[in-house]
Image (tube, helix red, strand yellow):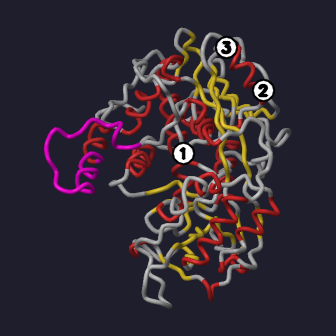
Amino acid sequence: MEPVIVVGAGLAGSEAAWQLARRGIPVELREMKPEKMTPAHHSPDFGELVCSNSLRSDQLENAVGLLKEELRRCGSLIMECADKNRVDAGGALAVDRQAFSRAITETIRSHPQITVKEGEVTEIPKEGQVVIATGPLTSEDLSKAIGNLFSNHKYLNFFDAAAPLVTFESVDMDSAFFASRYDRGTPDYINCPLTQEEYQAFWQALTTAQEAEVHGFEDTSVFEGCMPVEVMARRGVDTLRYGPLKPVGLRDPKTGREPYAVVQLRRDNAQGSIYNLVGFQTHLKWPEQKRVFSMIPALKNAQYVRYGVMHRNTFLDSPRLLDRYYRVRGQERLVFAGQITGVEGYVESTASGCLAAIELSRRLTGREAVNFPRETAMGAMALYISDESVVNFQPMNVNFGLIPQLGYRIKGKRNKNAELSRRALEKLKELDLS
């Protein structure tokens, strides 16, 4: 059997390669790193997390928690590596990003059915089965090749931003406290409170700070789920207080009261030596980041191991171009996976690679496709990105709104969501995932 060519060793590509290989399908995994890196890349390893180290909620009352559990039951490599390299983050699944990527890389490189070929792919292979999982950081040449493939359709893009990282030892803990919102889980977040006067001064500085030049960037092209903090701030003086700086559920032990605003820091590695500024994706100039973020009392002497960066994300008009298996309509040998399809988020990208690979392996072995039902998170996502009735297609995180309602009443939102998850997992049991 000729190997399936998987282009891109991010989360979706690594998961797709793994799912194919564990089913006996040979894979040639092509990855441009370390020969070529983008401004957002910092490591030669596979599955690099360039934005945040959090895979979000791990609870079944949350749609992304359900999606994680579905992936675990599908034998996901990404979830296995995440679970083994998790760091404390309350009810969320966060990972030591270096150990996580290293584990993925070692597993992929050691698999006898996977051959890794380094170097940039600039053209879509003209023959054979191909999975394109180059994600939001698709190189310029390959972007052009994809654009040529879909010359009669829209090929879309938006911009994405990553948050800064600071060292724990540089955080002024006299001006901060450990806690998780509503005391859920262990107190894993460092909370940096601001008074009303401190917040207003910070907000004013943030809205007027100098931004780095990013060609083609406009507020209207920013994806709402990963919006630069300065763009969010410009939407209103209290926008941040109802977003990443909301103080609700956080009580300062020094005062016994909720602060006016709170900046949260989340552990970024297992040692707890590096922390991520939660919700602080930004494309301010680096000196401006240091100047403005130092106005947060606990960060007045913060040491930055990485400043925030801005990069371009690209995605397809998938409802017109892809089917429910992430295959190109009319050219089924070509499959796309990951954020380039319009799924948004680490876990969602992983799930698209998983589903696409399961379907492809069955097709290559002469078996019927596995149709993940809409009641499952994986199925709901695949049916959303392939729904031709969607007119103004935009990237979307998994959510319970994509899943059919129960048809009977359950009291309480959390209880209803838990029941939706229970139903989804029962539906998943009915599928032959071999």
User: Residue 87, image x and y in percent?
Assistant: 56, 67
Q: Check disc 1 and report the residue beneath it.
A: 224
Are there few (<14), some (14-19), or many (20+) residues within 10 Å of tag 1? Answer: few
Residue 85 falls in which quadrant of the image? bottom right
Mark found first going from the N terminus, 1 or 3: 3
Are there few (<14), some (14-19), or many (20+) residues within 10 Å of tag 2? Answer: some
Mark found first going from the N terminus, 1 or 2: 2
Give the amino acid at mark 2: Val
User: Residue 175, image x and y in percent?
Assistant: 61, 85
User: Residue 222, image x and y in percent?
Assistant: 61, 42
- Label 1: which secondary element: helix
Residue 400 falls in which quadrant of the image? top left
Between 137 and 283, the residue placed more toward the observer is: 283
Give the amino acid at mark 1: Glu
User: Residue 254, image x and y in percent?
Assistant: 50, 91
Q: Residue furthest left?
A: 408
Give, as a single range, the part of the protein colored magenta.
399-421
Between 33 and 360, the residue placed more toward the observer is: 33
Q: Check disc 3 and report the residue beneath it.
A: 149
Q: Is 401 covered by the magenta stretch?
A: yes
- In this rendering, is residue 159 above or below 255? above
Mark seen at residue 232: none
Between 99 and 42, the residue placed more toward the observer is: 42
Answer whether labels 1 and 2 touch (C-beta < 8 Å).
Answer: no
Q: CA distance from mark 1 to mark 2?
A: 30 Å
